[in-house]
Image (spheres, helix red, strand yellow):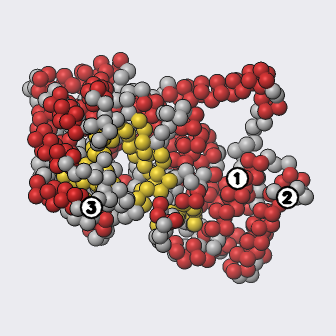
């Protein structure tokens, strides 16, 4: 696959027609587009019939069942892409582009290399030539029995495990001795800068008071690259807030050599691309509420997308702002954030009046930014609602400001966690194994000591999508007392384009990497959050399908919401990021793209 990324467009077109000469012949010989469409459907149907026909010709009979099953999936996608309905939905015809290319009528610059790579791989897949299984043989243990079969099987399983462990060695956790030492040095520098003591550092109020939100202070404390400075200058000029707690800043690599803090920096430093896309969206009047929360809010402070659970948002800021946050449209500077008791009273009364609500997710913003009195009042009011069985607190505090998990706060939690009556649980948000520090682990220990369950929601971004990177995070979290819960596909907002990863990659990660972990470690579900409606499972092809490949190589997906078996809910169409662009970026970052070669066959 590495070679394909290097070829020019002329060579890619040549390879495309070689991948399925019959498709090329059909396109060349058809006088009209509709004729080509009809003939292509006949061609694809003919292949599909032969794939599982015992009387088929030798070409198909000799192919293994996995290759033939992959061919069936590729045919399904190809048919979707050439359907007139999908052309109308997406306002684009990939078939017309292929037709014009075959006729040598297409403009040379109108089609991206990614477009041709998608169809090269589809064509190869359709003809059982994907290459995914080319060098593989049926495992020896399948033809053996008893101890001999066991011995051979163990060799394969050991190979799977050792390969994963080999990749794990590439990544660090915040518990590694060298990182602890370096970060302690960073901590000392930050404390000296603010003339602070250890007692100050361990006081969450001091952490909040000294949140870093200006470039000059940040530049005094860590080295910033030219690209980072450009992004921060653009954010300052256009009043786009960024906030970093002193604790989280201590996790930066001070010299910025890019060895281990790539994911750390990316989460909190707005890039120039992000800023310009954000500004453009605002200037064009684009609705930044990507998830459509305003349209699912029955009353101020509440969002509801499911039958028995609601989101309660008491606070509209966080100690630290994540650049890719889906709620960046409503997250404010911490100095401007408010906690309105009146809004919360009205919201709580709404919950009291609706017996169908069994669970309340308190999130925001980060609700644990509030003081103890406010948190105690909020938990007390919700706990007094008899039909609420569970209170879930969504917070990133354990990562960004673990000093907030004080003994006093733990006592408050303990009052409202009553086994058999009501559960209080914590859902946090670790993105990368380097975020787990001794301070975070101590905060987790305090919470777990009183019997509270903890879960993690990871946003799958470019910065944690390398081979086995998220597997390592799951492993680190599980043995630290946190259960992996959801892996979210990064949202489709233009400003977060640098964070987004093709859906095919999250599907590949689940099937080829996470599947090797023990079941209790891979407990997270990969999901796409459909605006206004909620989560759609990314493991089930019945919940989504590719309906178009655009001229720049991006796939368009149709998502069928979770309610589709209950009601006539309209599907949601989503334009993904290009697999080609993702692989090019990995290659530029010195990743071996051949490790990801099967990505084209995840739909």
555 w.r.t. 443: above or below? below
| Residue 177, label in figure | none
Q: Is residue 6 visible?
A: no
Q: Is residue 194 visible?
A: yes
Q: Locate residue 354, reporting x and y percent.
A: 27, 61
Whichever of callouts 1 and 3 sits on the residue coming sooner in the sequence is: 1
Q: Locate residue 254, reporting x and y percent.
A: 28, 29
Task: Tell us which disc is closer to us: 1 or 3.
Answer: 3
Task: Tell us which disc is closer to us: 2 or 1.
Answer: 2
Tell me what residue is drawn at x 36 percent, y 23 percent: 175
Whichever of callouts 2 and 3 sits on the residue coming sooner in the sequence is: 2
| Residue 70, label in figure | 1
Q: Secondary structure at mark 1?
A: helix
Task: Tell us which disc is closer to us: 2 or 3.
Answer: 3
Q: Locate residue 287, reporting x and y percent.
A: 30, 67
In which quadrant will I find the N terminus? top right
Give the side of residue 536 with respect to residue 434, left or right: right
C-beta proximity under 8 Å, tags 2 and 3: no
| Residue in the foreground of this view, choosing between 554 and 153 | 153
Q: Secondary structure at mark 3?
A: loop
Quadrant of res 98:
bottom right
| Residue 354, label in figure | 3
- Residue holding disc 2: 53
Q: CA distance from mark 1 to mark 3?
A: 48 Å
């Amino acid at each position: 696959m590495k070679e394909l990324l290097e070829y020019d467009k002329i060579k890619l077109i040549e390879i495309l027609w070689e991948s399925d000469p019959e498709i090329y012949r059909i396109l060349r010989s058809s006088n009209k587009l509709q004729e080509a469409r009809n003939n292509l459907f006949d061609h694809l149907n003919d292949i599909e019939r032969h794939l599982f026909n015992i009387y088929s010709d030798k070409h198909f009979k000799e192919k293994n069942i996995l290759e033939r099953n992959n061919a069936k999936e590729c045919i399904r996608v190809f048919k979707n892409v050439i359907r007139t309905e999908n052309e109308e939905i997406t306002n684009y015809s990939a078939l017309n582009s292929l037709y014009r290319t075959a006729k040598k009528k297409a403009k040379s610059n109108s089609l991206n290399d990614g477009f041709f790579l998608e169809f090269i791989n589809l064509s190869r897949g359709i003809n059982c030539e994907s290459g995914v299984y080319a060098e593989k043989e049926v495992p020896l243990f399948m033809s053996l029995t008893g101890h001999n079969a066991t011995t051979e099987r163990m060799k394969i399983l050991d190979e799977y495990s050792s390969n994963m462990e080999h990749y794990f060695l590439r990544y660090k956790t915040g518990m590694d001795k060298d990182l602890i030492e370096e970060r302690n040095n960073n901590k000392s520098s930050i404390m000296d800068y603010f003339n602070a003591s250890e007692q100050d550092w361990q006081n969450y109020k001091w952490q909040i008071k000294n949140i870093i939100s200006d470039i000059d202070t940040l530049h005094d404390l860590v080295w910033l690259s030219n690209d980072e400075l450009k992004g921060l200058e653009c954010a300052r000029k256009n009043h786009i807030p960024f906030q970093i707690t002193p604790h989280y800043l201590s996790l930066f690599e001070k010299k910025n050599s890019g060895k281990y803090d790539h994911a750390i920096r990316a989460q909190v430093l707005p890039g120039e691309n992000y800023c310009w896309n954000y500004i453009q969206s605002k200037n064009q009047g684009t609705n930044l509420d990507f998830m459509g929360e305003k349209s699912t809010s029955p009353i101020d402070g509440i969002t509801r997308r499911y039958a028995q659970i609601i989101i309660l948002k008491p606070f509209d800021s966080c100690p630290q702002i994540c650049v890719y946050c889906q709620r960046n449209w409503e997250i404010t500077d911490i100095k401007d954030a408010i906690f309105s008791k009146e809004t919360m009273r009205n919201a709580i009364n709404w919950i009291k009046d609706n017996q169908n609500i069994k669970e309340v997710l308190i999130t925001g913003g980060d609700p644990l930014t509030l003081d103890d009195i406010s948190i105690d009042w909020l938990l007390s009011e919700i706990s007094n609602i008899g039909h609420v069985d569970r209170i879930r607190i969504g917070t990133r505090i354990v990562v960004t400001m673990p000093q907030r998990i004080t003994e006093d706060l733990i006592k408050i939690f303990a009052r409202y966690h009553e086994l058999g009556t009501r559960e209080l649980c914590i859902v946090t948000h670790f993105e990368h194994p380097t975020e787990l520090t001794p301070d975070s682990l101590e905060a987790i220990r305090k919470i777990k000591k009183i019997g509270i369950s903890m879960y993690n929601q990871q946003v799958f971004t470019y910065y944690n999508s390398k081979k086995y990177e998220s597997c390592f995070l799951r492993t680190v979290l599980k043995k630290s007392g946190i259960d992996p819960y959801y892996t979210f596909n990064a949202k489709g907002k233009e400003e977060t384009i640098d964070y987004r990863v093709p859906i095919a990659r999250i599907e590949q990660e689940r099937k080829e990497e996470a599947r090797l972990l023990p079941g209790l470690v891979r407990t997270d579900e990969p999901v796409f959050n459909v605006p206004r409606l909620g989560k759609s499972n990314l493991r089930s092809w019945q919940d989504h399908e590719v309906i178009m490949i655009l001229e720049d190589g991006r796939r368009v997906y149709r998502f069928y919401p979770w309610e589709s078996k209950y009601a006539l809910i309209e599907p949601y169409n989503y334009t993904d990021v290009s697999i080609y662009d993702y692989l090019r970026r990995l290659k530029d970052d010195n990743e071996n793209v051949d490790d990801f070669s099967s990505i084209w066959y995840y739909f």
